[in-house]
Image (cartoon, rainbow, N blue to C red):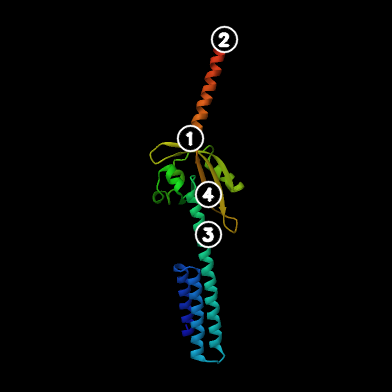
Amino acid sequence: LAPGIAVAVLYVVVVLMAGRFFQRPGVLFVGFACIALTILSYVVQHGETYGPALIRCLVSIAAITITTFLALRIQSAGAVLREQADLLETTHDAIFVRDMNDIITFWNRGAEELYAWPREEAVGKVTHELLQTVFPAPLQDIKAALIRDNRWEGELTHTKRDGSEVVVASRWSMQRNRAGRPLAILETNNDVTERKRTENALRRSEANLADAQKLSKTGS
């Protein structure tokens, strides 16, 4: 590489590093400083002459400008993702994300509280193995419906870390990439165990009442 190109590559690396450690004003300062140093270097070495050196200088400036723009875009996207993750942490719902192999990649505070599995132990595990999920239908059928409709809702039975069971109202949402291919699954679970117990107790009471009425009519 020519010395000018080598220096330009070094400046590009500096801008990328700035994107990791500085906020937007700092990245812009570093980018402008690298452009200014590139121009100053050209003027000192070549003065007002034109030729291949000028072309290399312009290419270097373009590369630094593009890199600065990309560093700011990446930084902005990262900030949005962090804000979204913070929002998921504020809800009491158990929320986690798993890839298409059902490997957990995100596990919020609500999931920690519901299942008693800390994030460090949950992430990287197969969700249905970790929670010993009992499905209302074959898993392949559920996944087929999810891929077709981009969502699925139903009740699942999970096992907590202490071995107790919990019934959840589960909502699955499919996340796709720009090409439309399935990328990940966002699962939101609400504990409905007590509600199910109340409903079951009510049904048993109604059944017992119906039996008692039948016996009463038979006896009369």
Instruction: Report the residue at 50% width, 29% height from top.
Output: 198
> What crowding class fits label 4: few (fewer than 14 Cα within 10 Å), some (14-19), or many (20 or more)?
some
Q: Earlier in the sequence, mark 4 or mark 1?
A: 4
**Label placed on residue 80:** 3
Residue type at mark 3 is: Val
Report the quarter where the C terminus lies: top right
Instruction: Report the residue at 54% width, 22% height from top.
Output: 206
The nearer-to-camera label among 2 and 1 is 1
Q: Nearer the viewer, residue 107 or 89?
A: 89
Residue to which mark 2 is pinned: 218
Q: CA distance from mark 3 to mark 4?
A: 17 Å
**Label placed on residue 186:** 4
> What crowding class fits label 3: few (fewer than 14 Cα within 10 Å), some (14-19), or many (20 or more)?
few
Q: Earlier in the sequence, mark 4 or mark 2?
A: 4
* Residue farthest along the left direction in this orientation: 162
Residue to which mark 1 is pinned: 193
**Label placed on residue 213:** none
Q: CA distance from mark 2 to mark 1?
A: 37 Å
Q: Earlier in the sequence, mark 1 or mark 3?
A: 3
Residue type at mark 4 is: Leu
Q: Secondary structure at mark 2?
A: helix
Q: Secondary structure at mark 3?
A: helix
Instruction: Report the residue at 57% width, 44% height from top.
Output: 152
